[in-house]
């Protein structure tokens, strides 16, 4: 279930609070992935990991989510995931879509993010775009608060749009975004206004596609998804 691989060993976390933060980000990364057999087999372990988090809004949100996640049938979970994230453009888990939409800037943003992973000593995943939220959360967990969480802060408005869309859809997955957003800096009044505007107008768009504007060696074999 790991999405990123280290090229070099990192420095172990020395503070319990950072260990808890790392655990939270790792849990969010896992719970936002497709519920395949490996993830379903780990449901009891995931529940224990949630229970081990310190008392917080994030732990309460994940605890509520895990009640549903552990009780639901595998086929129901798979169907809910596809309906929530694959069939609804407004709740896509690809973060650069919310900031750049279908414009040429998105291709370069993807390349920049991929390079950020490599600079931190992490191998970007094969066959998955680097702005996929589970990948970004795992990067945050592995690289630490300063470097690792920078993409989450950069795409904070996008996260809020996803959370709003999930709440509007009435899906328990909104609780996972609640847990993540509670651990990040809150939005300013100006940012909340920008989120409201984006929700109404939608992300930027161009008539052209993305493929010609990102280096071919990066986009080859990958589907640029909303």
Image: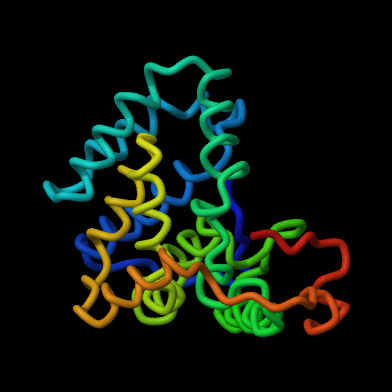
Quadrant for the C terminus in the image: bottom right
User: Residue 29 at x, y = what percent?
Assistant: 46, 51
Q: Residue at x 31, y 39 (%)?
A: 49
| Count of numbered tags | 0
Residue 194 is at least partly visible in this image = yes
Q: Is residue 21 left or right of residue 159?
A: left
Rendered residue at 30%/25% (across/down): 67
Q: Is residue 11 visible?
A: no
What percent of the width, then of the height, locates residue 33? 54, 43
The one nearer the camera, 194 or 32, is: 194
Residue 1 horizontal/vertical position (percent): 58, 43
Q: Residue at x 35, y 51 (%)?
A: 177
Q: Quadrant of residue 12?
A: bottom left
- Dividing the picture into quadrants, the one containing residue 144 is bottom left
- Up the image or down, 83 lies above or below 209; here it is above
* Image height of 5 relative to 208, above or below: above
Q: How is the image coloured?
A: rainbow
Q: Position of residue 179 (x, y in %)?
A: 28, 51
Q: Which residue lies most toward the left here?
A: 55
Residue 160: quarter of image: bottom left
The residue lying toward the viewer, choosing from 64 and 122, is 64
- Residue 216 left/right relative to 186: right
Q: Is residue 38 above or below residue 101?
A: above
Identity of the residue drawn at 88% across and 79% down? 216
Instruction: Spot the residue most to the front.
Output: 200
Q: Nearer the viewer, residue 74 or 103?
A: 103
């Amino acid at each position: 279930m790991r999405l990123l691989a280290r090229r070099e060993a990192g420095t172990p976390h020395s503070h319990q609070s950072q260990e808890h933060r790392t655990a939270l980000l790792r849990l969010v990364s896992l719970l936002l992935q497709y519920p395949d057999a490996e993830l379903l087999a780990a449901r009891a372990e995931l529940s224990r990991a949630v229970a081990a988090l310190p008392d917080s809004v994030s732990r309460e949100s994940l605890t509520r989510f895990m009640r549903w996640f552990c009780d639901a049938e595998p086929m129901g979970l798979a169907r809910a995931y596809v309906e929530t994230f694959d069939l609804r453009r407004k709740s896509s888990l690809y973060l650069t879509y919310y900031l750049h939409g279908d414009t040429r800037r998105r291709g370069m943003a993807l390349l920049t993010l991929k390079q950020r992973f490599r600079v931190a000593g992490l191998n970007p995943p094969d066959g998955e775009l680097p702005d996929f939220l589970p990948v970004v959360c795992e990067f945050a967990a592995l690289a630490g608060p300063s470097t690792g969480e920078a993409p989450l802060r950069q795409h904070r408005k996008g996260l809020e749009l996803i959370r709003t869309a999930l709440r509007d859809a009435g899906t328990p997955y909104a609780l996972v975004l609640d847990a993540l957003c509670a651990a990040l800096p809150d939005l300013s009044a100006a940012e909340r206004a920008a989120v409201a505007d984006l929700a109404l107008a939608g992300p930027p768009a161009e008539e052209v596609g993305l493929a010609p504007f990102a280096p071919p060696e990066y986009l080859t074999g990958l589907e640029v998804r909303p």
